Image: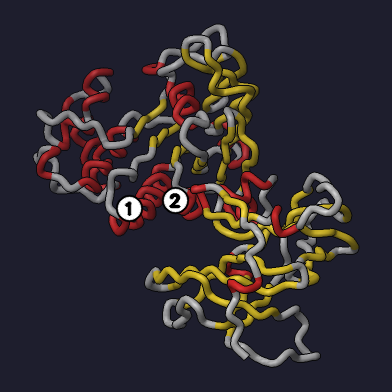
Amino acid sequence: MSDGMHADARSVRVEDLCAGYGGAPVLRGLDLHVPGGSLACVLGPSGCGKTTLLRVLAGFQAASAGQVRVGGTLVDDGRRAVRAERRRVGYVPQEGALFPHLCVADNVGFSLARMGRGGRGARATRVGELLELVGLAGLEGWHPHQLSGGQQQRVALARALAGNPQLVLLDEPFAALDAALRARLRADVRSILDAAGVTAVLVTHDQTEALSMADVVAVIRDGRVVQAGPPAEVYRRPADEHVAAFVGEGTLLPAAVEGGVAVTALGVLELDAASALRSGRALAVVRPEQVRVGPPRAPSIDAPETVLLGRVTSSMYQGHEARIDVIVQTSAGPLSIAARVGGAVALGEGMAVTVSISGPVWAIAAEVRAEGTDALQHSHEMRGHHGHRPVGAHPPESLCWRE
């Protein structure tokens, strides 16, 4: 069998899926394809349908319409559903949910014993292999209360892998862990899944988690996948204003697109070559890493980009970098924009700076605004999964420009 055929046999396909609770719809025609051996991170705000999707994939809840295929097998078509225990699907809940009275080895081998798979010796061998895989060899006799949070999640993952599943589902498995442990465990879990060769779907509301771990990021809104693709694609080329605001930070600028450029209050910006929008009214997505902030300097006719005067209004030190907000003076009036600078750069509130934009921007089609409306009233500052908020024009006297 070719690698392509083998990968397809392990893939997950969800088509026009509908599901809900008590007659209230949650998933409304959701489509998702996860290639075999890939990790898909399903990202979205609370209530969007992430957990419902996971429950339908696991067989804990039946679909009301649509189709779900796991490893090429139709497991739910809205009329009949394969029972959860027959799906070869492993499940890792949010906080491990280990049996407190069982040791590590018995927790991992619990499903094998229930299914009567192999003799006692074969099961012990399989458990030992899995504990080696997740880095817990030697802890077979420990109990959950003796383990750290990260170790408990590794045991839960080993248990999910015990039955050689075609699909592993992870329901926000790092949510209860501290930040440092969460980052380490993400990398470890990704390596473990790769070594096991299984397809996986991880549900999260943490955009950093999704972007750093996934082969495929699927953004859900109102029960549908509004964009799915490689992390860099979803971040750099969001499908709409809401995806741009939810995945990452940045600024949305009203723009007029024409001839491969976007004309904005921050100047004429190069347009991403992949943009299908070649003319018309748009919103230009400017990510913080594209914003160049420096000391005030005299304008240069040799500078290829527009350089504007600005003032730092807030600065949040984050160790390796600082996240700052800058008010820049444009021909249309003051405008707020988010930027990131190296942590060693000292930029405090009130400091005068210059601002320019580096690299191409992505343009999203925008509705035509009423004539005479201040364009800056429609700019937005994006703050990751916290959503976006309008940034109105600031009065000129609020800017204390230094000569």
Q: Position of residue 281 (x, y in %)?
A: 83, 53
Tell me what residue is drawn at x 38 percent, y 39 percent: 172
**Residues packed near mark 2 inside 10 Å, few (<14), some (14 to 19) or many (20 plus):** many
Vertical order, 48 against 265 (above or below): above
Vertical order, 30 against 263 (above or below): above
Tell me what residue is drawn at x 43 percent, y 77 percent: 343
Vertical order, 120 against 36 (above or below): above
Q: Position of residue 306 (x, y in %)?
A: 75, 78
Mark found first going from the N terminus, 1 or 2? 1
Q: Which residue is mark 1?
A: 182
Q: Which residue is mark 2?
A: 209
Tell me what residue is drawn at x 68 percent, y 53 percent: 237
Residue sitting nearer the eye, 210 or 299: 299
Which disc number belongs to residue 262?
A: none
Label 2 near label 1: C-beta < 8 Å?
yes
Colouring rule applied to residues: secondary structure
Q: Which residue type does callout 1 highlight?
A: Arg
Q: Which residue type does callout 2 highlight?
A: Glu
